[in-house]
Each structure stands twice: as C-alpha cells, then as structure tokens.
Image (cartoon, rainbow, N blue to C red):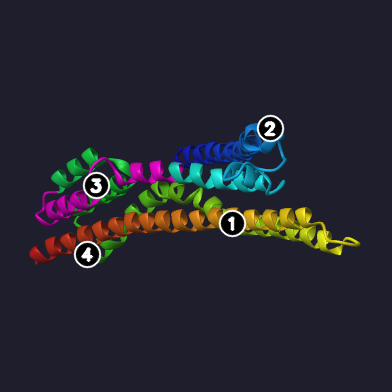
Amino acid sequence: MANVKKESKSNGGDMFSGLVIVSCIIVGWLVWKFVMGAATNFKDGISGGEPLEGNYLAMVYKGGSIVPVLMGLLLMVVVFSFERFMVISKAAGKGNLDAFMKKVQGNVTGGDIDGAIEACDKQKGSVANAIKAGLIKYQAVKAEGLNSEEATETIHKEIEEATSLEMPMLEKNLTILSTLVSLGTLAGLLGTVTGMIKAFGALASTGTPDQAMLANGISEALINTATGISTSALAIIVYNFFTSKIDTLTYSIDEAASTIVNTYRRFRGSLK
C-alpha cells in the first residue's frame, strides 16, 4: 500500500515538473516577444529597431532567439525554488524545529515517551513522523524486553524505513535545479557564440566593416552571457540552500534516533 502511494506521488510529481518546464519556456517566450519586444520600448515605435535610451527590456530583447530560452530557465529556477521551499518547510513541521528537538530529547531522556509522541503529533511533518515511528517502536521493544543490541537494530531500522517514506520527495526537484546550473551556463554560452559569429561576420564583410552589425553582435553575445551567468548563479545558491536544509532535517532525525537508543540502553542497564 505504501509503495502504491509512493508511486502515485512520484507520478504526480513528474507530471507537475513537466508542466512547469513547458509552461516556463512558453512564458519566457511570451515575455521576450510581447513585453521586451513591445514597440513602446524602441525608437519610432518599431519593434526590434533601435532601443530607447536606458530601456533595458529592449536591450535584452536584442539578445536574440536564445534569450527566451534563458528566460524560461530563469523562471524554472524561481518556480522550483518556491516549490521546494514549501515542501521543505512542511517537512520541518508547524513549530520551530530546534525547539521541537529539545522538547523531544528532554521527554525521551526523562522517560516521558508519551509526552514525546504527543509533541510529534503537534509538530507534524516528515521529521516528526520519522521520530514518532522510532518512539512507538521504542515502546514495543521495551515491552518485549529486548537486549540493547537487538533494540538498537530494531529502532534504527524502524526510523530508517519511516525516513525512506518521508524524505525522498524533498530531493525530487533538486535534480532539476542542479541541471539548470549547467543549462544556464551552456545556453548563455551558445548565445555568446552566436553573437560573436555575427560580430565576426560584420568584420569579414568586404570593404568597410558594418559597425552597426558588429555592435549588435557583440551586444547580443554579452546579453546572453550575463543572462546565462545570472540564471546559473541563482540556481547554485538555491540548490546549496535547500541541500543544507535537507541535511539539517536528516541530522535531526539521526540525533533523535541516537537519543532514543541511548535511553533504552540506560533502561536495560538499570534492570541489571
């Protein structure tokens, strides 16, 4: 049943990711074509002509056909960042995670397992669910009277299984963000190359070089370079940020598991 539920979530997530990617590319093209390329951004109202002085929208529009792709990639970074933030925040639970961990550890150390379970119910989220599974198993092994080694293995296994069901979705779209780091750079580089080809084409013309074409080619190259670097830089920042958040959640679960196991060992030691 759990596998069916997990597969259903995975399929739903894949569909969402696909829709976001296609939608961002379409929106990026629309913004480039109708917002940046609006006639009001250019002199004499001629779309694609000479940009108005200081009009950056028109300047970016002149970056060429690679710009809408870069705009789509940038939108993907923004959308997936918001989506990951919502998911990871939900996984941490309702209250402050550090305060929750202190409360649970205090309850477990004091032998108040029911209080710790109650705290997990109030906190909710992936971390609380995984810890709650370990606490319930703690009560079970305590009732069975297992020795420390058997109890340690059983509790850790239970928490690992609970974590495997709760945590994988946190990393789902991080792969896309990490891919966008490379794609942003490569797309920007492609735009740079096409711009430089136009620039050198102007220099290679017979007679006097076409200065306007030379300037447009260099401008296109630089615009694509700047947009590609910006996209990659933002993707790197959010990817590292969310990776750090997930590591913190995982560490919290491991820390709670260690506290539960050590408490059981003290309990078994007191019986001797």
Residue lying at 72% horizontally and 40% vertically, measured from the top left: 49
Q: Where is residue 222 in the image (x, y as percent from the top left)?
A: 64, 58
Q: Which of marks 2 and 4 is in front?
A: 2
- Reply above or below: 65 against 209: above
Q: Which mark is residue 226?
A: 1
Q: What residue type is labelled 4?
A: Ser
> Dot 1, crowdedness within 10 Å: few (<14), some or many (≥20)?
some
> Dot 4, crowdedness within 10 Å: few (<14), some or many (≥20)?
some
Q: Earlier in the sequence, mark 1 or mark 3?
A: 3
Q: Residue 148 carries which label?
A: 4
Q: Which of marks 2 and 1 is nearer the N terminus?
A: 2
Q: Position of residue 35 (x, y in %)?
A: 61, 34
Give me the C-alpha separation between circle 1 and circle 3. Answer: 54 Å
Q: Which of marks 4 and 1 is in front?
A: 1
Q: Which of marks 4 and 1 is nearer the N terminus?
A: 4
The secondary element bearing badge 4 is classed as helix
13 or 181, nearer to the observer = 181
Q: Do the residues labelled 4 and 3 touch (CB within 8 Å)?
A: no
45 or 94, nearer to the observer = 45
Region of the chain picked out in magenta, as a range: 83-112
Residue lying at 55% horizontally and 37% vertically, measured from the top left: 16
Q: Which amino acid does label 1 sit on?
A: Ala
Residue 78 included in the magenta stretch of the image? no
Q: Which of marks 2 and 4 is nearer the N terminus?
A: 2
Residue lying at 80% horizontally and 63% vertically, measured from the top left: 200
Whether residue 155 is visible: no
- The residue pinned by badge 3 equals 136
Give me the C-alpha separation between circle 2 and circle 3. Answer: 71 Å
193 or 95, nearer to the observer = 193
